[in-house]
Image (cartoon, rainbow, N blue to C red):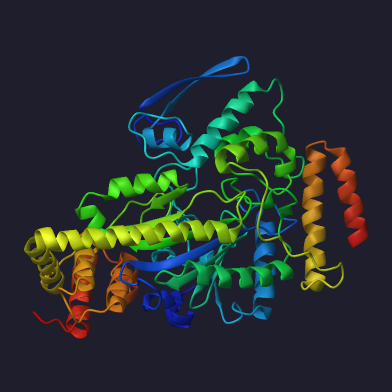
Amino acid sequence: MTLDLSLLPDGGLQWLAPAGEHAAIVLSSRIRLARNLAGFAFPPRAREGERLRVLQAVRQVVPGLEGLRDGVLVRVDECTAAERLLLHERHLVSRELAGLDAAPGAAPGAPTGAPTAGAVVVTGDVGLMVNEEDHLRLQVFRSGFDLEGALRYAERLDRGLGTAIPYASHPEFGFLTSCPTNTGTGLRASVLIHLPGLVLTQEIGKVLQGLQHMGLTHRGLYGEGSEVLGNLFQISNQTTLGRAEGELVDQLARVVRRVIEREEEARRVLCREAGYIIEDKLWRAYGTLRHARSLSGEEAMQLLSGVRLAASLQLVTGLGVYTLNKLLIFSQTAHLMHAAGRPLTESEASVARARYVRSVLAAEAKITD
Amino acid sequence: MLCDQCRERDAVVHLTQIVGQSVAQVHLCERCAAERGIETTVSEPKHPLGDFLQAVQQQASQLPGDLPRCAYCGTSLQEFRASGRLGCAHCYAAFDQSLRELLRRVHGATRHVGWRPTAPAAEGSSALGELDRVSRVEALREELARAVAAEAFESAAALRDQIRALE
């Protein structure tokens, strides 16, 4: 299957356009609901036939559901490895569903692949994963800080889906999931947040520790198990049972609001105490991105973090949040390969990345010194 | 020495496990050890799954003789302990006692509060129609085969009745 990205509504990336609150610090808000269909074993245990029937059921009801009917269904298990990685880079498909990790117990270096009948329904702001760890993983994305809006929309979609295809549930435990850490609401609410100020002032450790005390957790850009790159953190709730969805989201939102305040404060301190050092550092980051001929993924992420900070401090003007968000997604390896139309070696990808970043900055940034 | 679990990284945690009558040595790398909830001095922040798996492990080692097994999908408590994943909705009933304890540890609660699943549409008026009925019969047949294999004859009889009713 060749994945035609132009068919995906807004490429599944509507959130790149900054619309929500605090868009310069919070890149996106996300609500994820884990659901299973009644009458089928959970995907890791299900036989191929069951997984195919789950997919068939989803395929059948989606055209009748508001909010999902315009979605495009992509059979992830029929995509090439590069296409699967690309969907993962867009946060539409998890590592597990993209088959990026070898199956547990497989020999190192064994070929990886997406699980049978793994699929994703993509709209501009929704990704519905099918046959991941749970039969359904509904994700709603919003630009900026808008957890409440994302939750309201997720609730509507969830009601529609749950009426059309009955969910596995338990009178006491609520929605049943493959992993008991998701049981109950099946809800994971998260924000993707840029915290360079707290990292530079070395306050971040305290903040992250504080999150743990509040029953929240943090991860890297790509979610569970991923490292923090470019000062981008995903902050999310950790427990899913015993508190209502609204309450879980409220608590996360309250804490995130405090984190935003502390980040803003850290930025003010940096400018006051070390203004010219910060300014120099950020212009150097911009200069490197604007002129480098080869950029590794990690270096690009670090430098983009600096430029994002410079833009929000208005040290660099003429560089929009949209451009920065776009650079973040499209400078990733699978996206570069997709643009090149062929596989790239690591060094070729670094050259292609530098060229792409230069071209975007030249065309879209109206930088004045 | 390589880690018993991932066979990729060096084992740095060496455990002696006593399960029932047998003693087993387990060698794990830091990451796999952390995943199983075994604390090392340099382990990453603890994930609730770690606590949870540890709890399952403790519970399992207390159980004499055969470990419980889900009659529907065949998942055993032991497999659940190894993977941290339940096999199907019925596992929640099969491992009710262990799960209750674990859910309390992980979430601090066992009772779901919040959105309720929408009541399923009445039989025959299902949005899925005919295909749904056929799928259900097939799914029930698979469950029946599993139940028979697991010698859970009571469940098997109930499943057979459900299949007859649908057909």
Relative side of A52 to B120, left or right: left
Q: Position of residue B5 (x, y in %)?
A: 46, 34
- Residue A102 sits above or below residue A341 on the image: above
Q: Is residue B106 visible?
A: yes
Instruction: Decide if residue A59 is on the left or right side of residue A200.
Output: right
- The answer, for residue A348, to whether it is visible in the render is no
Location of residue B123 in the rendering, given as x and y in whole percent from the top left corner? 87, 67
Q: B113 and A298: which one is in front?
A: B113
Position of the C terminus of chain A, as image quadrant, is bottom left
Q: Residue at x 35, y 35 (%)?
A: B9
- Please state the horizontal and vertical placement of residue B26, each as a whole percent of the image: 47, 24
Residue B87, compared with residue A302, is above or below; it is above
Q: Position of residue A354 (x, y in %)?
A: 18, 70
Q: In the rendered picture of this protein, how many numbered marks are placed on residues?
A: 0
Left or right placement of residue A248 versus residue B70 in this view: left
Q: Quadrant of residue A180?
A: top right
* Residue B47 horizontal side relative to residue A242, left or right: left
Residue at position x 64%, y 44% in the image: B86
Q: Is residue A156 above or below residue A113?
A: below
